[in-house]
Each structure stands twice: as C-alpha cells, then as structure tokens.
Image: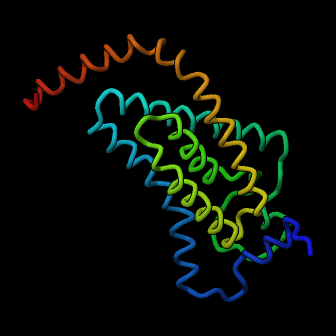
C-alpha cells in the first residue's frame, strides 16, 4: 500500500470531533513551542561568555538563512495549504500563503543542524529535531500543513545551516570590530548600573 501526501494528511488531520485535550495540546504546540527559541536564545546570551555568544550568532544566522531559503522555495513552488483546497478540518486560523515548507519546522530543524557546528550545543540536536517533528505533527493535525510541507523543511533547514557553517569563519573575521564595540558598550552599561 502506498501513502501519498493527501492520504497521509487525512490520516494525521483531526477529525470532525477531535478530543479537546489533543486539540488543546496541538494548538499549544503549534503556536507556542517555537516561542521558546528566542527566550532561550536571550537567556543564553545574557549569561554566556564570548564563545557562547559566537555560537548563538552562528545559530541565528543559520535560522535566518534557512527561513530565507524557505521563502524562496515558497515563491518557486507555491503549494496551497489543505484548507485552501478544501481538504480536512482546520482548527487553527491561518492566512492562505504557500505552506511548503513549514516555517515553524524549518526554524527548529535549522537550529538542530546549526548546533552541530558549535562546541557546546551538540547535545541539543535530538531535542530540537523532536520539537520540530512535534510541531509538524500539530500543524498537520490542525489542518494548516500537509505532511510534505513538514518533510520539505528538513533539506531547507540543512542547507541553511550548511551555508551558515561555511560562512562562519568569514563572518567572525568581519564582525571582530563589532564585538570589540559591543564589549565596550556592555562594560560601560555594567559600570553605569554598578554591576561590574
């Protein structure tokens, strides 16, 4: 038996009367899990030494490149969302922009690949991949993505992280003067706040 994109969508998508606990969990995961990323990034930045901050910049560049690539893919291959072609049941309000690849999943998986290029963050690879898979499931369950939209995020995220890794040495060389200015501003702010 073969499973195509529409058939897989119909298997995962919530039915006409989904259980309220699964629906609530899917909505929370689909909308809010990705918001943990900037919170964690800012917390690590605030407490991190320069090496950690260099890694955080690398991770942010990876995410930006992957999300930029995702936009290009969406323009080149404008794939409609399930509700736009009247398939399944939609339980999450969403605009009708192209759905391939999923931006939410692309973000999480680009971070997973990006931390492979860091000295301290490689332990986060599997949790980030799992979080992306969970978000992907939730967004298909809620009717705003097809399974192929989620699967397409994987190569886009990998390419974005790969480009960031290739650009990292050049970016670090180029950004040295900026880091020096940033350190001077941070020291001045700490002295002003009497925290130094």
Q: Look at 51% across and 69% down and name the residue there.
A: 28
Q: Quadrant of residue 178?
A: top left
Q: Farthest residue toward the right?
A: 1
In the displayed structure, 147 sits above or below 35; it is below
Q: Residue 64 appears at what percent x and percent y?
A: 58, 35
Instruction: Tell whether 86 sits left or right of 59.
Output: right
Q: Quadrant of residue 7?
A: bottom right
Q: Look at 50% across and 35% down and name the residue there.
A: 60
Q: Residue 188 appears at what percent x and percent y?
A: 17, 20
Q: Look at 70% across and 73% down and name the residue there.
A: 90
Q: Residue 183 appears at what percent x and percent y?
A: 27, 20
Work out which quarter of the rendered image holds the N terminus and state it: bottom right
In the displayed structure, 21 sits above or below 119; it is below
Work out which quarter of the rendered image holds the C terminus and state it: top left
Q: Look at 70% across and 67% down and name the residue there.
A: 140
Q: How many marks?
A: 0
Foreground residue among 95 and 133: 133
Colour scheme of the picture: rainbow
In the displayed structure, 87 sits above or below 145; it is below
């Amino acid at each position: 038996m073969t499973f195509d994109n529409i058939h897989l969508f119909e298997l995962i998508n919530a039915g006409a009367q989904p259980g309220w606990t699964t629906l609530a969990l899917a909505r929370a995961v689909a909308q809010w899990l990705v918001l943990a990323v900037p919170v964690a990034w800012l917390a690590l930045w605030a407490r991190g030494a320069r090496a950690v901050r260099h890694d955080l910049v690398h991770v942010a560049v990876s995410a930006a490149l992957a999300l930029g690539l995702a936009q290009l893919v969406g323009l080149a291959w404008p794939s409609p969302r399930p509700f736009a072609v009247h398939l399944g049941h939609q339980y999450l309000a969403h605009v009708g922009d192209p759905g391939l690849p999923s931006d939410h999943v692309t973000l999480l998986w680009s971070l997973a690949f990006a931390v492979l290029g860091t000295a301290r963050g490689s332990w986060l690879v599997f949790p980030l991949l799992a979080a992306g898979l969970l978000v992907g499931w939730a967004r298909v369950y809620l009717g705003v993505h097809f399974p192929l939209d989620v699967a397409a995020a994987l190569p886009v995220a990998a390419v974005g992280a790969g480009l960031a890794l290739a650009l990292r040495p050049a970016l670090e060389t180029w950004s040295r003067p900026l880091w020096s200015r940033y350190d001077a501003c941070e020291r001045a702010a700490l002295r002003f706040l009497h925290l130094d």
